[in-house]
Image (tube, rainbow, N blue to C red):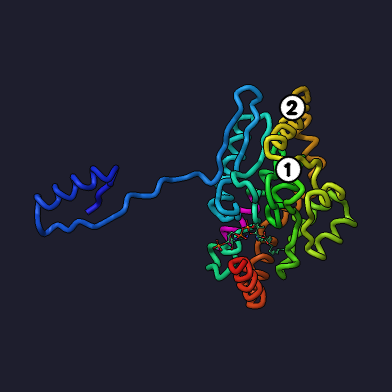
């Protein structure tokens, strides 16, 4: 018997009703469904038209398929509504994003693994090539996939000095794909990228500022949001089409890489991540995270 429970009161009434109708009908004890909490909040400022997109997957905003799907949908919606700009931030006080959800890559059936990676690819592409200006207001740690999101925006303002940022994949025994490399190289240059990626280094905010991995360091989230707004405001007088085409031209290598290599990139990811050695490495890394 399908019963939709609107409230506990309705549940009680239903129970009485059910018993009185027939003793042979069994009432299944069922908890009311948990409220659906969005993993990504979008708030558009009436005055400036700038959207604040807040990652909201406690405790660490690790990027799983549902979060990436919601982020991709939010970006599409902003495109459709000709947004003036987007500030990407986090609802956590200490973590911007812990990067890809390792549980999505550990011991995962192949169809789910494939859906996870293709969602990451398409959400990344829509962020990286968005027609509107984008700023990452990095209000906490931002390792690996978290750093990728920040690098894909046009400007990075980070709360410091205590949080860290970087692409630490090699430390986990995995390899940052070429589009991660392109993103980092475009921001900090070839030499610093080689050093950062081969060591899998995480930079403190002051260190990140020194090598240009972030554009600015501030002392709290309010300051980060103010600076992000200021960055976007400077585009108010720039014709949007000229801006969009210029951005696409500057980011052409990364955009073309993804458009031309989506399937190969997926295949390489699947082949690499499903290797027993890599799975063992992820298992051990998860264990160290849990032990902390
Ligand atoms: C050519 C194709 C090749 C493709 C190869 C694959 C390429 C993969 C590319 C990207 C890789 C990634 O993004 S992997 C993710 C890497 N991320 C990290 O290394 C960060 C790990 N996390 C941390 O360092 C810390 O959690 C933190 C500094 C971000 C925050 O610290 P804090 O003390 O606040 O929180 P906890 O450490 O106690 O964590 C709380 C809780 O969350 C779990 N957790 C943390 N990070 C992740 C994660 N990335 N995925 C899944 N789960 C994570 C942690 O285990 C704790 O869980 P419990 O509460 O259950 O103990």
Q: Residue furthest right?
A: 191
Query: How far across and down, in percent of the image, does residue 241 sit?
Result: 74, 29
Q: Is residue 4 left or right of residue 237?
A: left
- Residue under the image location 60 percent in, 33 percent down: 80
**Total number of numbered discs in the rendering:** 2
Check disc 2 and report the residue beneath it.
Answer: 233
Q: Circle 1: is it few (<14), some (14-19), or many (20+) Cα within 10 Å?
A: many
Observer-nearest residue: 75 or 137? 137
Tag on residue 153? 1
Q: Residues within 10 Å of mark 2 (few under 14, many from 20)?
A: some
Magenta stretch prevailing secondary structure: helix
Judge whether 29 appears above or below 9 on screen.
below
Stretch in magenta: 113-122
Q: Answer left or right for 209 relative to 106.
A: right
Camera-side residue of 217 and 32? 217
Can residue 154 be seen here? The reply is: no
Image quadrant in which the C terminus is located? bottom right
> Of residues 135 and 265, which is closer to you in this image?
135
């Amino acid at each position: 018997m399908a019963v939709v429970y609107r409230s506990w009161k309705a549940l009680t009434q239903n129970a009485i009703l059910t018993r009185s109708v027939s003793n042979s009908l069994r009432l299944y004890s069922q908890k009311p469904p948990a409220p659906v909490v969005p993993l990504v909040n979008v708030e558009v400022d009436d005055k400036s038209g700038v959207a604040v997109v807040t990652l909201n997957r406690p405790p660490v905003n690790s990027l799983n398929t549902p979060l990436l799907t919601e982020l991709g949908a939010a970006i599409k919606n902003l495109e459709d509504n000709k947004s003036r700009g987007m500030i990407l931030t986090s609802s956590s006080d200490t973590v911007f994003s812990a990067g890809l959800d390792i549980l999505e890559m550990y011991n995962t059936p192949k169809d789910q693994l494939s859906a996870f990676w293709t969602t990451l690819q398409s959400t990344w592409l829509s962020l990286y090539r968005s027609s509107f200006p984008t700023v990452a207001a990095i209000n906490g740690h931002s390792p690996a996939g978290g750093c990728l999101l920040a690098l894909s925006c046009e400007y990075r303002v980070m709360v410091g000095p205590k949080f860290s940022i970087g692409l630490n994949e090699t430390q986990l025994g995995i390899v940052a794909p070429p589009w991660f490399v392109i993103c980092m190289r475009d921001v900090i240059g070839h030499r610093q990228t080689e050093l950062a990626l081969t060591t899998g280094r995480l930079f403190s905010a002051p260190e990140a500022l020194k090598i240009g991995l972030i554009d600015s360091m501030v002392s709290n989230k309010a300051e980060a949001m103010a600076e992000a707004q200021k960055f976007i405001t400077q585009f108010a007088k720039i014709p949007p089409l000229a801006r969009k085409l210029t951005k696409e031209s500057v980011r052409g290598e990364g955009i073309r890489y993804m458009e031309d290599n989506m399937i190969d990139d997926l295949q390489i990811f699947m082949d690499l991540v499903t290797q027993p050695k890599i799975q063992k490495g992820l298992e051990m890394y998860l264990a160290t995270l849990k032990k902390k």
